[in-house]
């Protein structure tokens, strides 16, 4: 676990979790990082700037108009100095400011003036975290490439319990240390459903929203990978730093994926590709003339198996969405298609498809790991971390 040589600007905002931030500075420095701290006025009501000066070895600027800043660390210079800006704790207020481009204090000005990646460790009341406004701000920040670490679930300051607890300092350091786990790696991801035409206006499809695949693509990009996303028709924003290739049918998905698979180091097949397609789609709309309509279906090409069967296949990860015997069916798919890993989840009414949450179990030939139930973006991060570990182990880098 190393952050050797990393220049991290830690922003501390006004929440009770600020008491954890001095320990976070110490652990970041233990991992090899050089840390400088910027505090909001509210944060200084919880922890004194002198505490951070003692643990970081650097003076804490007083604000935008700090008279000492002109001596070598003006706000623009500090923004350029950072390799990473981390805000922990990140309150609902600072998330709102960052989402909407406000720059009314030193910390938000630095964020707006810097090209460094931004990571937030939210900490707030559970109702504030789950409010539509905060979730909309979270989604907007993530679309721009901001990494959201947590929050955790557990006891909160108001004698309540739920989501909103800041991750522990060591958890944050581990997450940051692993954020470059796929640096220099080419990752190819498929996502979303396919649409198989019956006639000019009708098609056969499925309930996939594409959210899991898009979350995986975003997590891989945040881990440093060069990511290409082959996507079926969905109404989702392309994750920051990801190249999207749009497709419609299973045949399109097969063609575009196989054209890129030979250049990929890792392939993650998260798309819900149709297993069958109408054999003879009509060129124009079929009129409603008979009480019954028969549509003959034929098997589509198996994208996942084709990638795994390449002469020099990438590290190949599949998904198994099952309604029954989830683990057994997933392991059968893992073995018959000769995959490196498979992520299994149960689907059905209210599960898997068209929902924000999911639950995954990852399997490989001699093991498995339960990733738990969580929002898809959180599960995607856990999954990519596990993929990176297994990929490095297979290639002798672990």
Image (cartoon, rainbow, N blue to C red):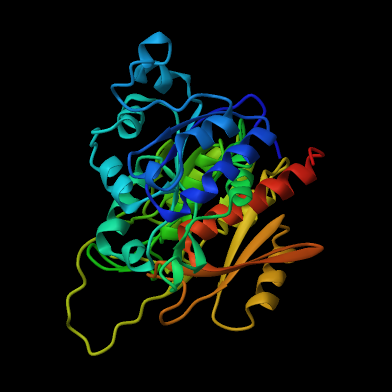
* Up/down of 391 relative to 131, above or below: above
Image quadrant where one finds the C terminus? top right
Residue at the farthest top position: 71
* Up/down of 167 relative to 262, above or below: below
Q: How many labels does the image show?
A: 0
* Up/down of 256 relative to 348, above or below: above
Residue depicted at x 50% and y 67%: 153
Q: Which of 208 and 171 is in front in this view?
A: 171
Residue depicted at x 67% and y 75%: 327
Q: Which of 295 and 60 is in front in this view?
A: 60
Image quadrant where one finds the N terminus? top right
Q: Nearer the viewer, residue 158 or 245?
A: 158
Residue 96 at what x, y percent from top left? 27, 48
Residue depicted at x 32% and y 53%: 92
Q: Can residue 211 be seen here?
A: yes
**Is 335 on the left or on the right of 112, as rendered?**
right
Residue 367 at what x, y percent from top left? 78, 64
Q: Nearer the viewer, residue 108 or 329?
A: 108
Q: Can residue 255 be seen here?
A: no
Residue 52 at what x, y percent from top left? 52, 35
* Up/down of 293 relative to 109, above or below: below
Q: Quadrant of residue 65?
A: top left
**Is 103 on the left or on the right of 259, as rendered?**
left
Residue depicted at x 35% and y 33%: 107
Residue 391 at what x, y percent from top left? 72, 45
């Amino acid at each position: 676990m190393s952050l050797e040589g990393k220049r991290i600007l830690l922003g501390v905002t006004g929440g009770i979790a600020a008491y954890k931030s001095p320990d976070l500075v110490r652990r970041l420095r233990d991992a090899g990082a050089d840390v400088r701290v910027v505090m909001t006025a509210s944060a200084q009501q919880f922890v004194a700037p002198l505490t951070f000066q003692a643990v970081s070895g650097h003076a804490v600027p007083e604000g935008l108009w700090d008279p000492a800043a002109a001596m070598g660390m003006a706000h623009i210079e500090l923004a350029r100095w950072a390799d990473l800006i981390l805000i922990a704790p990140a309150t609902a207020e600072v998330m709102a400011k960052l989402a909407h481009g406000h720059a009314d204090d030193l910390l938000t000005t630095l964020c707006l003036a810097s090209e460094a990646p931004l990571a937030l460790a939210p900490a707030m009341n559970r109702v504030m975290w789950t409010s539509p406004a905060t979730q909309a701000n979270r989604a907007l920040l993530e679309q721009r490439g901001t990494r959201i670490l947590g929050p955790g679930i557990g006891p909160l300051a108001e004698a309540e319990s739920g989501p909103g607890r800041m991750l522990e300092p060591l958890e944050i350091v581990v997450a940051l240390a692993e954020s470059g786990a796929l640096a220099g790696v080419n990752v190819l991801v498929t996502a979303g459903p396919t649409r198989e035409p019956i006639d000019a206006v009708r098609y056969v499809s499925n309930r996939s929203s594409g959210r899991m695949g898009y979350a995986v693509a975003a997590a891989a990009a945040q881990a440093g990978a060069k990511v290409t996303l082959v996507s079926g028709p969905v109404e989702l924003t392309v994750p920051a730093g990801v190249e999207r290739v749009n497709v419609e049918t299973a045949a399109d998905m097969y063609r575009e994926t196989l054209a890129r698979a030979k250049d990929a180091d890792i392939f993650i097949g998260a798309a819900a590709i149709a297993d069958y397609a109408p054999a003879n789609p009509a060129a124009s709309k079929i009129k409603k003339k008979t009480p019954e309509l028969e549509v003959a279906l034929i098997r589509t090409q198996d994208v996942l198996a084709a990638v795994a069967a390449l002469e020099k296949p990438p590290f190949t990860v599949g998904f198994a969405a099952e309604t029954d015997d989830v683990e057994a069916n997933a392991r059968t798919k893992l073995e018959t298609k000769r995959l490196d890993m498979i992520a299994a989840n149960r689907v059905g009414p209210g599960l898997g498809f068209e929902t924000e949450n999911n639950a995954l179990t990852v399997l490989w030939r001699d093991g498995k790991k339960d990733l738990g139930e969580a929002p898809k973006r959180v599960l995607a991060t856990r999954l990519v971390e596990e993929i990176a570990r297994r990929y490095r182990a297979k290639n002798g880098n672990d």
